[in-house]
Image: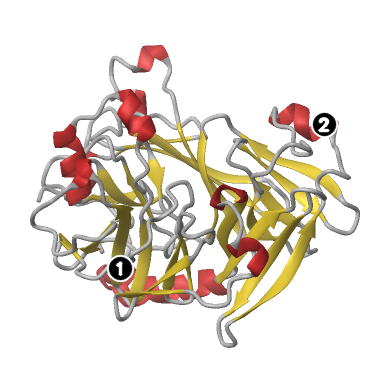
């Protein structure tokens, strides 16, 4: 397959001139200045160097936040550059100071038809895809490297089905996929979704209520898994990745929700045991699941008190501990709500906020599905501070820079 990195167009926030010509089809991207010794260049391009750099980045005490959004180009640029839905912006912030550290705009040669889904951070890499098109990429915003992948069977089947806008809205398949690392230089994409008429596939070995596709980067191919969960997956909850497992939230089944656990090493599914009773008996739309510092976390906003409790799984013990109790009702902040154009202290809001990161001073960074912004909550003073807002923001995750590429 032709390498997509030969067609990348990049623009930085510092106003640097955009390249007027794309790289030639067979030209390799320049990684280091030609004045460097050959052995130094080879060392920078080596996997061992990238892994050492990655280890240092993970151990750094400076926490970074990546906000990913789609960028609209100016009208006079449309004559020279691809459509707006092909452009994705990566903005890196310091968690403690909220200062913008860098901003990079990357153009993807194949558009997303304004349906963009973005995975979580995996070694500084992100997977960006669209269920409406056959576009799927892996990108490293720090090095501006990207790779276009062959479409999953799900994307191919959806393209053939050609659903109307009303049919798209009525679908309850899972459009989010998980980007994981099995071992050094061994990455995988895991796409678990609900079975239905529009993704029926005679070649799939599983006829259950769910299907699962796994992409192997070394083989450059997707494959079905034969054994998948017998519970339908809740479509609005993103999968969470922690401690070598991927987790999905299920739909209600006999008055209870479950958490599906996928082991990366064995590629097997199981149900997570000992879910907190108050969460297990809830409507899945009133529950949030995420990852904080490589721990699986779940939270729920209580209907009466409106207090959101956040619980963390202790994997070695299989038990849960409450780490935060967030009372947004008691801390209305007009300045924050005006700037964010979202009422964080709404009393009728049942959907919980999503924890993004924990600061050194125990403040917690929050996002919400109804908001395009980020706020910091101080549990000691019960106060909110505005962090960032962008109406086009798609994903906000913890981040660290890496040199990993060519996977």
Q: Nearer the viewer, residue 385 or 400?
A: 385
Label 2 or label 1, whichever comes before in sequence order: 1
Disc sitting over residue 130 in the figure:
none
Q: Secondary structure at mark 1?
A: strand
The residue drawn where x is 39% and y is 57% is 125
Find disc 1 in the rendering and name its residue.
187
- Quadrant placement of the C terminus: bottom left
**Label 2 belongs to which residue?**
335
Residue 321 location, x and y as percent?
70, 75
Q: Decide: few, some or many residues near mark 1? Use Cα within 10 Å; few <14, some 14-19, many ≥20.
A: some
Q: Is residue 73 above or below residue 137?
A: above
Q: State the image coordinates of residue 25 (x, y, percent, origin top left).
A: 12, 42
Q: Is residue 159 left or right of residue 75?
A: left
User: Which is nearer the eye, 34 or 320?
Assistant: 320
Residues under numbered marks 2 and 1 in contact, where contact means CB atoms less than 8 Å apart:
no
Q: Residues within 10 Å of mark 2 (few under 14, many from 20)?
A: few
């Amino acid at each position: 397959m032709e390498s997509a990195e030969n067609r990348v167009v990049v623009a930085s926030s510092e106003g640097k001139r955009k390249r007027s010509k794309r790289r030639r089809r067979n030209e390799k991207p320049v990684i280091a200045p030609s004045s460097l010794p050959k052995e130094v260049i080879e060392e920078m391009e080596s996997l061992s160097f990238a892994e050492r750099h990655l280890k240092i980045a993970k151990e750094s005490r400076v926490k970074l936040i990546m906000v990913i959004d789609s960028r609209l180009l100016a009208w006079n640029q449309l004559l020279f550059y691809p459509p707006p839905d092909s452009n994705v912006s990566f903005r890196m912030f310091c968690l403690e100071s909220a200062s913008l550290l860098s901003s990079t705009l990357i153009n993807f040669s194949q558009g997303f038809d304004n349906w963009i889904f973005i995975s979580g951070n995996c070694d500084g890499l992100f997977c960006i895809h669209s269920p409406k098109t056959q576009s799927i990429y892996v990108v490293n915003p720090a090095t501006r490297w990207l790779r276009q992948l062959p479409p999953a069977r799900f994307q191919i089947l959806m393209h053939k089905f050609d659903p109307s806008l009303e049919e798209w809205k009525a679908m309850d398949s899972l459009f989010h996929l998980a980007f994981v690392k099995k071992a050094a230089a061994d990455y995988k994409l895991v796409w678990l979704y609900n079975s239905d008429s529009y993704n029926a596939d005679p070649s799939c070995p599983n006829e259950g209520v769910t299907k699962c596709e796994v992409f192997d980067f070394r083989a450059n191919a997707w494959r079905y898994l034969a054994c998948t969960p017998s519970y339908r997956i809740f479509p609005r909850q993103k999968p969470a990745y922690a401690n070598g497992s991927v987790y999905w939230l299920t739909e209600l089944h006999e008055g209870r929700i479950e958490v599906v656990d996928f082991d990366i090493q064995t590629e097997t599914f199981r149900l997570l045991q000992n879910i907190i009773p108050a969460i297990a008996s809830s409507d899945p739309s009133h529950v949030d699941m995420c990852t904080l510092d490589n721990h699986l976390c779940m939270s729920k906003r209580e209907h009466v008190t409106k207090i959101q409790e956040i619980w963390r799984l202790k994997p070695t013990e299989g038990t849960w501990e409450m780490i935060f109790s967030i009372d947004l009702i008691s801390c209305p902040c007009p300045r924050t709500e005006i700037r964010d154009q979202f009422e964080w202290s709404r009393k009728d809001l049942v959907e919980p906020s999503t924890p993004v990161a924990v600061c050194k001073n125990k403040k917690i960074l929050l996002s919400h599905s109804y908001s395009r912004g980020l706020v910091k909550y101080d549990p000691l003073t019960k106060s909110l501070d505005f962090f960032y807002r962008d109406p086009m923001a798609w994903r906000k995750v913890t981040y660290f820079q890496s040199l990993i590429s060519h996977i």
